Amino acid sequence: MSDSDETATEVFHVRLEAAVARKARSIESESLPLLKSEFQRLHTSFRNFLSVIQQKGLVSGDPYKHAKKISEVSIPENMPIYDSDSNEDVGIRLSEYESQLDFLTSYYEFSLEFLSLKRIKLLADLAKFVNWASLSVT
């Protein structure tokens, strides 16, 4: 490799490092706060929705909601529910989802260092947990 090739490679690396650092700062200062804000909005909307359907008696509340400790985001169970236990099971799952959103918006760290690809996938799956398009009046 000639001196000019090495210099061009060094210049490329310096520029690449600077561009990556600029993008990281942009993500930290703009994208991650926006993501957290959107999850806070989802949490508020979902909490209101859950309150209304509980008041109407469509689902039961989770009596053990405050006994569960959350240390990492997880997706609530999504297995089929049988008709005999549907009101109670749906209420428990929705309560677990609300608890996950509460943990996410209150305690979760929205930073590049913390958010691995696995955690980003969990956040995406959590955001898609409720299929709003298939929700009906009944």
Image (cartoon, rainbow, N blue to C red):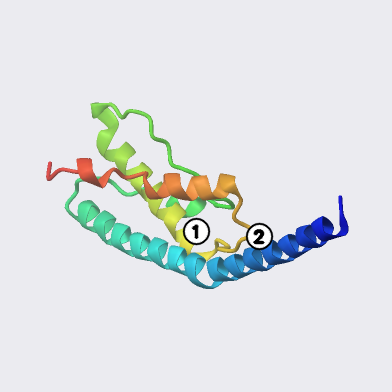
**Front residue of 131 and 51:** 131
Mark toward the viewer: 2 or 1: 2
In what quadrant of the picture does the C terminus appear?
top left
- Residue ID for mark 2: 113
Residue 136 is situated, as x and y percent measured from the top left of the image, at 15, 43
Q: Is the residue 41 above or below the residue 85 in the image?
A: below
Q: Amino acid at mark 1?
A: Phe
Q: Is residue 83 left or right of residue 3?
A: left
Query: How many residues crowd mark 2 within 10 Å: few (<14), some (14–19), many (20+)?
Result: few
Relative depth, front residue between 102 and 25: 25
Q: Could you say which quadrant of the image residue 7 lies in?
A: bottom right
| Other-residue count near label 1 (Cα within 10 Å), few / some / many at <14 / 14–19 / ≥20 | some
- At horizontal 55% and vertical 61% (from top left) the residue drawn is 108
Residue 54, percent from left and from top: 24, 52
Does residue 63 show up?
Answer: no
Q: Which mark is residue 103?
A: 1
Tell me the element at label 1.
helix
- For image coordinates 49% across by 71% down, the residue present is 30
Mark 2 vs mark 1: which is more N-terminal? 1
